[in-house]
Amino acid sequence: MMNLLTILASFGLVIVAFHALIHWSLRAPRVVEQSTPEAMGLAYSETQILTTNDKQLYAWFIPAPGPELAPALVVLHGWGGNAETMLPLAAPLHRAGYALLFFDARSHGRSDIDTFSSMPRFAEDLDHALNQLKLLPGVDAKRIGVVGHSVGAAAALLAASRRDDLAAVVSIAAFTHPETVMRRLLAAWHVPYIPIGWYILHYVQHVIGYKFDDIAPLNTIGRIHCPVLLIHGTEDTTVPVSEAQALYSRRYSEADKLLLVSGSHDSYEDLDQQIGDMIDFLNDAMNV
């Protein structure tokens, strides 16, 4: 009897340790900003956004250049990023007449830490940022949109699928399905899918509180009412370009666009040259 109890206790400790390891894997690396929009010659103000679990998000608000009510965008980074990683978009979008709100998701940059990070939590933070953006001075609350990268792009698609007040969504390097991403990661770590990988995927869904099918961009993108622009690097090895094409196949409006650019998952060599295509898309969607 004692041997059985010892075995069960040991097995329980292994399970607890394994769960702790999974939770640790859901913590994104925190990188704090080293620069601000001022370095790009842009006037801005620091602000805080109250989000879920009474956490505070760090943000930069860049008002539009003109005195009239302006269209506005929330810009969201990817996993392990921060507002600074998206700053290359700020100057051209600002010149085009947009007010901009860049923010750090929970447990990223200068925002409050939470128990774990996940794509649904990115989407929760994005919802709160959008709600605050609509109240900021000089913003036309009827012309707001989202720009997201990677996990932030998937979160933008998820948030947009649950709202009817957005004029446009720009998704940069979104994946099709969380399970696809995790299975690629497990394969890279040489973790066998049966039984370990299967267990990890099901436990992660339990932790984040969502089934992967319910939040997968491949499913949420079809529920979005506003125009969607999908941007993807043709040399992206993290998320193959075929996933952008699969997402685009779920859209049916002529207002939707797929823009393939030279570059990888995090670096886009031609984006500076093709930012005009993004702005043209936004202008059409926002009636600028």
Image: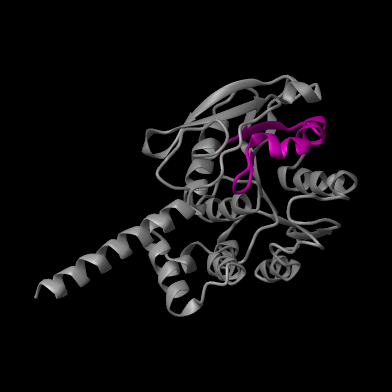
In the rendered image, the residue lying farthest to the bottom is: 194
Q: Is residue 97 magenta?
A: yes
The x, y position of residue 33, in whole percent, is: 65, 30
State which quarter of the image contains the C terminus. Answer: top right
Report the number of numbered marks. Answer: 0
Q: Nearer the viewer, residue 273 or 220?
A: 273
Q: Confirm whether residue 47 shows in the render.
A: yes
Image quadrant where residue 61 sits: top right
Q: Is residue 144 above or below residue 266?
A: above
Q: Residue at x 49, y 52 (%)?
A: 118
Image quadrant where residue 173 sits: bottom right
State which quarter of the image contains the N terminus. Answer: bottom left
In the rendered image, the residue lying farthest to the right is: 273
Q: Residue at x 60, y 62 (%)?
A: 221
Q: Confirm whether residue 208 shows in the render.
A: no
Q: Is residue 50 left or right of residue 91?
A: left
Q: Nearer the viewer, residue 34 or 286?
A: 34
The x, y position of residue 184, in whole percent, is: 61, 69
Q: Which residues are magenta?
A: 75-104
Q: Is residue 183 magenta?
A: no
Q: Residue at x 31, y 64 (%)?
A: 15
